[in-house]
Amino acid sequence: MIELVTTISLWELIKHCSSWISNLKRAKEERKKESIEALKRVVIASRKTALYLKKREQTGTRDVGTEEELSMLWTELGLSLEVLNVNKLAEKCFIKGKHWENPDKTDIDYLKKSDVGLEKMMNHAISILKDYK
């Protein structure tokens, strides 16, 4: 009887482990997809910001609504990347979000030292994306 219980318990343990490994693989794939989507959104946010800056330069007028959207976009990206442990890029997104919250009060020297140029951030995201392929 003890042998039967042990065999059944062992079988249950094996089934549980198999299920756990399957779930872990699925979770890794989901995390990979989330990471790829977040990195793609960094590229899109960079483009959107560049287009806004181009428009602002051409027209000479600021659009506070667009700046608010950019602030939220960059902040949301920072949060997404932080959860995915892409911390360096997440921090840069937070800095961008804070900058667009009130561009007039941003410390330009701090921005330069933070290395948050749009091209640099976009290239960083693209570089990480290539690692996922």
Image (cartoon, rainbow, N blue to C red):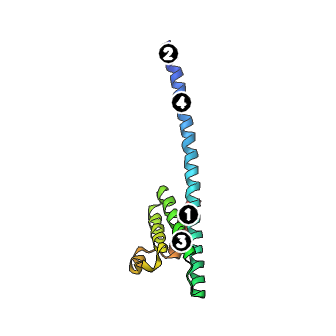
Tag nearer the camera, 2 or 3: 3
Q: Position of residue 62 (x, y in %)?
A: 55, 82
| Element under disc 4 | helix
In percent of width and height, residue 46 lies at: 56, 72
Q: From this viewpoint, is residue 130 visible?
A: no
Asked whether disc 1 touches disc 3, contact meaning CB atoms under 8 Å apart, the reply is no
* Kind of residue sitting beneath label 3: Glu
Q: Nearer the viewer, residue 72 or 84?
A: 72
Mark closest to the chain's N terminus, 4 or 2: 2
Spatial distance from mark 2 to mark 3, Cα to Cα?
68 Å
Distance Cα–Cα, label 4 vs label 1? 37 Å
Between disc 3 and disc 4, the foreground one is 3
Which of the labelled discs sits on residue 39, or is there none?
A: 1
- Residue 132 is tagged as none
Q: Name which residue type carries label 2.
A: Glu
Amino acid carrying mark 4 in the image:
Ile
Query: Relative to 25, is 6 above or below?
Result: above
**Residue 52 falls in which quadrant of the image?**
bottom right
Where is residue 1 shown, x and y percent of the image? 50, 12
Instruction: Please tell me which of labels 4 and 1 falls first in the chain.
Output: 4
User: Considering the numbered disc 1 on the image, is that residue within a helix, a strand or a loop?
Assistant: helix
Callout 3: SS: helix
